Amino acid sequence: MDVLLPLLVFSALPCFVVPEVPSKVPYQAAIELVTGAQRIFSGEKLHLRCSVPEDKKSIWKYLWFKGNDEILESENLILYGVSLTEDGKYYCQGVRSTAVGTLHTVESKPLEINVDGGWVILRVSPNPCLVGETLSVTCQVRHNPKIAEVALYRNDVEVLRQKGPNPHLQLTNVTLGDQGMYTCRATWVKERRSQSSVSVGVDVSVMEVLTKPVLEMVLGDPLIPANMMMLKCLLQYNAHAPAPPLHFYYYKNDYKIGTASSKNSYVVSQTPGVYYCKARVPELDLMRKSDTKTFGLIRAGFSPPGPMAVPTRPPTTNEIHQPAGCPLRPVQSMDKPLPPEEATHPNKEAAPLDDLMSGDAPDLSDSSFD
């Protein structure tokens, strides 16, 4: 018995299991451009710094990558006298050792470095640019001599010319027609001789803040009843953070269905009609409307009514214009007006998808918007 007792005690000890720790944490590394620019002349200095902005309390080490190759373990990446071979996309990652293993952050967004061996560089900001914004361009010359003139070209057509030492130009209130391939020509004087050179082209994109919506009708979705269909208002919303709220509106036969919603989908019954949607950003005073889309069979000669004010009660005989010689029978007045929602939304078969699944959706309706 004395021999068995230690064995029994030993077998009764609890077994501790160390939980598995994920190798990646939900933090993303970030690259800071300390010295230089994304477009840089060969021979110049480039200084990049890596950090983990979401976790400044912990001590992190940093790995640097160019493409798929790891090139350095350091907080700072400094390139003295960059060469054309150092052109490419760079990104970094935070690494930290713990008692239960090594943790890695999410890789930073790649930073593309363009090394130019010529005499002139064109720098563009912002790129891409939004409709209505100002596009700022700089036509920089190597070693920064005194500039006599700069000219800006889009798709080989001159759009701006400026005399004097200022290398900065601006295109205000840009439109979609302003996108294209841009170059600049700089002229300067060195040792009493005029010199001129053209930059490498820069592809500039211009985007609409709110693109034209496209209405999509989804039938047979297993998540909604068989006699219903889902309306989707598809678009691109390109706004600087924090982006103002975007509201969606749905219409059938030119009558608004239900209330505004922050979601781009709405569920309605499968009834024939002409449908479309609108998207609106009240803070930016922007509104776009989709093309109409017909569902089901529409009777011949039918056309959706135009926008009109719907009265809250029928007119009385005193309010009706009575032509001479054409007597009218009295019209019985209604004692109470129609409910406002019935008057403005006669097709009350609509319901947001969330209403069908899990309660009411938030009411974002704007009474000033039809």
Image (cartoon, rainbow, N blue to C red):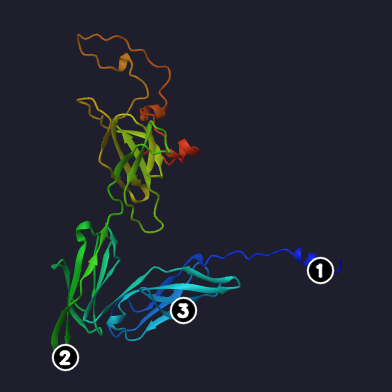
Query: Which sits earlier in the primary sequence, circle 3 or circle 2?
Result: 3
> Label 2 neighbourhood size at 10 Å, few (<14), some (14-19), many (20+)?
few
Could you tell me if residue 238 is visible in this image? yes
Q: Residue 325, image x and y in percent?
A: 19, 8
Which residue is under mark 3?
75
Looking at the picture, which amino acid does disc 2 mark? Glu
Q: Residue at x 45, y 70 (%)?
A: 29
Secondary structure state at the residue bearing disc 1: helix
Looking at the picture, which amino acid does disc 1 mark? Pro
Q: Splitting the image into 4 quarters, where does residue 262 fall?
A: top left
Q: Residue 289, image x and y in percent?
A: 28, 43
**Marks 3 and 1 in Cβ contact (< 8 Å):** no
Q: Residue at x 26, y 38 (%)?
A: 292
Q: Is residue 85 left or right of residue 348?
A: left
Q: The C terminus lies in which quarter of the figure?
A: top left
Position of residue 185 relative to residue 18, above or below, is: below
Secondary structure state at the residue bearing disc 2: loop
The nearer-to-camera label among 2 and 1 is 1
Q: Splitting the image into 4 quarters, where does residue 136 fall?
A: bottom left
Q: Residue 86, image x and y in percent?
A: 31, 80
Q: The N terminus lies in which quarter of the figure?
A: bottom right
Instruction: Please give the label number shown on residue 191.
Output: 2
Looking at the picture, which amino acid does disc 3 mark? Glu
Q: Residue at x 25, y 83 (%)?
A: 144
Query: Which sits earlier in the primary sequence, circle 3 or circle 1?
Result: 1
Residue closer to the observer: 77 or 223: 223
Residue closer to the observer: 184 or 318: 184
